[in-house]
């Protein structure tokens, strides 16, 4: 964990701690909670914890459970109050925060049941106000909360205190913001199933805690973290109220901290030790800030924006500009598999061997064409042996009606198949009586997986990838039928290890969404990394000459300063890429898990690729229709 100088923190209004990753950060928070509990035990008093739900604190709870199982920590003297609960909500629902807390913490420790307090989602409307007043009174009667754990929503909400909540607000029933409901849609299998209300502790209740720890992981939280830490206090971003608290820590991983001034633009905060990466980042930032091509930047431009010491060290703006311009130019290649019979000293990929064996890992059955479809087509067109490994079935992202549609087709094809007709009747009855969020039967999960497999094969055929080169791994960690997945296992790694060793690729492409600590992309990448490390440990010869390129998904792109290969896509290839995305018909028009972007995936991908090309053009590079960017992983 890096300890910054005081002047680096001059933009920050809340004490902020940045860890290398979410695991390290979670361990630090778990240790602080454990220390409080032990201190209170020695004093013979109760430790009062305010707890949160969601993916952010899960690893903290895992560590606390581990401490308990190892005999290092007892919870006999602990009292807990949870921040919130959906309303209405039955406690045994798969969406209930009661169930969440039991599964992740309470069922695995020795806490006294009467010391656990979670807002009641089963109340009648007439009883809610009195219940909320009593919840406040219970907190007050035990002496207040010692440590309050928080996450943060994209709107800046803490608990379910949406924009507009006041500093003095108390525990109450609140209507959920549409953005909050969109973010929860994946857990509820659609926005329409997300409750519109919740019971939440108020901002004032949270502010009364003696210590507050807000945690955030991933680049998706970086913008709102920057606003909360460095912005003005305002009701439209409730987390900014935490600037008033005299004992509040924001605990972040590097990705969540990436928009803070000391991380994103450190030259504005203090004098920097300039290395090549920082010079490149700063020059691109300055070019975009001033809307000037890199080669047009002047000494005065650098001096005006806190980079005077860079000019003093290097000599002149012209020298810096030319160096960064050449670095960017060398990332651009129309030959993602390497250009044969060419000098490759300034190219991102090797000229030889040619053709190469290229293996593209796709976490879901459409990530390959959405994220790097133009590059995939280019590899095929240039004669490389392209394989695609679909890591998961993607079955939970198929609507129920798709199953009925395919089974009806099968019935018409096999009119005399009595067993099939019986099966379809059973499936229809199950789906007709299925509750929102209820898990599909294993059979229906299989049908949905087959639908996505068929779509992936159609996309492969369209792109020119032979069906024999499409590998459906169906990694076990994913096959729960629910949004929440199992931890990765040795079996996941073994399946990936065996495939790699069978294909022996010269280059690997994988989804590099490193900032997502709990999503499918993140786990799929960890599995690949573990398999690669095992191949390295086993001294497998081919791995020494394999390049690994990381792409990103439809929601975001690598920063240009990080890109090490940028593949131009012309209008014709962009149209081909979109057609390949269209082959995934179950995800067309309306995806099960659209995220916070209402556009279709092909629209997101097209705009993302065009934006990358426009940014390169504005920096002074050649003008292209679109571009896909990659970062090389060195293992």
Image (cartoon, rainbow, N blue to C red):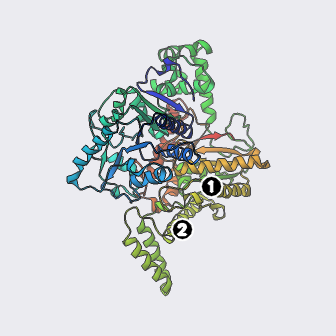
Residue 32: image x %, image y %? 50, 35
Outermost residue, left side: 126
On the rendered structure, is 507 left or right of 434?
Answer: right
- Asked if residue 201 can be seen in this view, the reply is yes
* Relative depth, front residue between 411 and 376: 411
On the rendered structure, is 243 left or right of 455?
Answer: left
Residue shown at the point (59%, 60%) measured from the top left = 476
Q: Which SS class for mark 1?
A: loop
Residue identified by numbered label 2 = 450
On the rendered structure, is 540 left or right of 632?
Answer: right
* Relative depth, front residue between 3 and 357: 3
Residue identified by numbered label 1 = 489
On the rendered structure, is 231 left or right of 490?
Answer: left
Residue 463: image x %, image y %? 58, 58
Residue shown at the point (49%, 39%) measured from the top left = 217
Label 2 Cα crowd, 10 Å radius (few <14 / some 14-19 / many 20+): some
* Relative depth, front residue between 154 and 148: 148
Circle on res. 554: none
Label 1 Cα crowd, 10 Å radius (few <14 / some 14-19 / many 20+): few
């Amino acid at each position: 964990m890096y300890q910054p100088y005081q002047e680096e923190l001059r933009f920050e209004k809340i004490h902020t701690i940045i860890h290398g990753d979410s695991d390290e950060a979670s361990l630090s928070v778990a240790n602080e909670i454990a220390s409080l509990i032990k201190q209170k035990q020695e004093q013979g008093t109760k430790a009062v914890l305010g707890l949160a739900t969601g993916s952010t604190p899960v690893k903290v709870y895992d560590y606390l459970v581990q401490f308990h199982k190892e005999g290092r920590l007892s919870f006999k003297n602990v009292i807990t109050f949870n921040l919130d609960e959906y309303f209405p909500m039955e406690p045994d629902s798969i969406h209930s925060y009661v169930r969440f807390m039991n599964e992740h913490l309470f069922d695995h420790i020795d806490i006294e049941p009467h010391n656990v307090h979670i807002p009641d989602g089963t109340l009648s409307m007439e009883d809610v106000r009195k219940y909320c007043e009593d919840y406040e009174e219970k907190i007050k009667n035990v002496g207040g909360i010692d440590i309050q754990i928080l996450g943060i929503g994209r709107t800046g909400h803490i608990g379910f205190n949406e924009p507009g909540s006041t500093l003095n607000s108390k525990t109450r029933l609140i209507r959920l913001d549409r953005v909050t409901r969109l973010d929860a849609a994946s857990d509820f299998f659609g926005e329409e199933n997300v409750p519109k209300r919740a019971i939440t502790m108020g901002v004032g209740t949270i502010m009364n805690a003696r210590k507050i720890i807000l945690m955030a992981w991933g680049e998706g939280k970086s913008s709102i973290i920057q606003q909360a830490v460095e912005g003005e206090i305002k009701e439209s971003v409730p987390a900014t109220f935490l600037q008033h608290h005299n004992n509040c820590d924001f605990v972040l991983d590097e990705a969540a901290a990436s928009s803070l001034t000391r991380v994103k633009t450190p030259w504005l905060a203090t004098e920097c030790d300039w290395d090549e990466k920082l010079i490149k980042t700063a020059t691109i930032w300055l070019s975009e800030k001033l809307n000037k091509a890199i080669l047009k930047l002047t000494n005065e431009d650098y001096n005006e924006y806190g980079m005077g010491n860079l000019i003093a060290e290097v000599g002149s703006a012209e020298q810096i500009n030319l160096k960064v311009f050449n670095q960017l130019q060398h990332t651009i290649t129309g030959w993602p598999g390497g250009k044969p019979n060419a000098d490759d000293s300034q190219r991102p990929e090797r000229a030889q061997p040619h053709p190469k064996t290229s293996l593209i890992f796709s976490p879901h059955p459409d990530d390959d064409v959405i994220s790097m479809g133009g590059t995939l087509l280019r590899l095929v067109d240039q004669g490389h042996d392209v394989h695609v490994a679909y890591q998961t079935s993607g079955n939970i992202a198929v609507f129920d009606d798709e199953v009925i549609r395919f089974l009806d087709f099968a019935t018409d094809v096999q009119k005399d198949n009595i067993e099939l007709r019986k099966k379809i009747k059973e499936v229809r009855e199950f789906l007709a009586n299925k509750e929102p969020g209820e898990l599909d039967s294993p059979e229906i999960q299989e049908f949905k997986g087959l639908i996505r497999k068929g779509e992936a094969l159609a996309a492969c055929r369209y792109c020119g990838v032979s069906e024999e080169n499409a590998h459906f791994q169906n990694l076990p960690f994913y096959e729960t039928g629910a949004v929440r997945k199992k931890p990765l296992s040795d079996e996941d790694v073994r399946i990936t290890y065996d495939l790699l060793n069978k294909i022996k690729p010269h280059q690997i492409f994988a989804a590099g969404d490193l900032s997502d600590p709990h999503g499918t992309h993140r786990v799929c990448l960890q599995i690949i990394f573990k398999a690669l490390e095992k191949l390295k440990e086993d001294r497998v010869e081919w791995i020494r000459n394999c390049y690994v390129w990381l792409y990103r998904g439809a929601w975001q792109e690598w920063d240009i300063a990080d890109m090490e290969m940028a593949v131009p896509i012309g209008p014709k290839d962009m149209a081909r890429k979109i057609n390949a995305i269209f082959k995934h018909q179950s995800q067309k028009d309306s995806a099960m898990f659209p995220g916070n972007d209402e556009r279709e995936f092909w629209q997101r991908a097209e705009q993302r690729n065009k934006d990358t090309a426009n940014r390169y053009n504005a920096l002074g590079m050649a003008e292209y229709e679109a571009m896909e960017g990659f970062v090389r992983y060195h293992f």
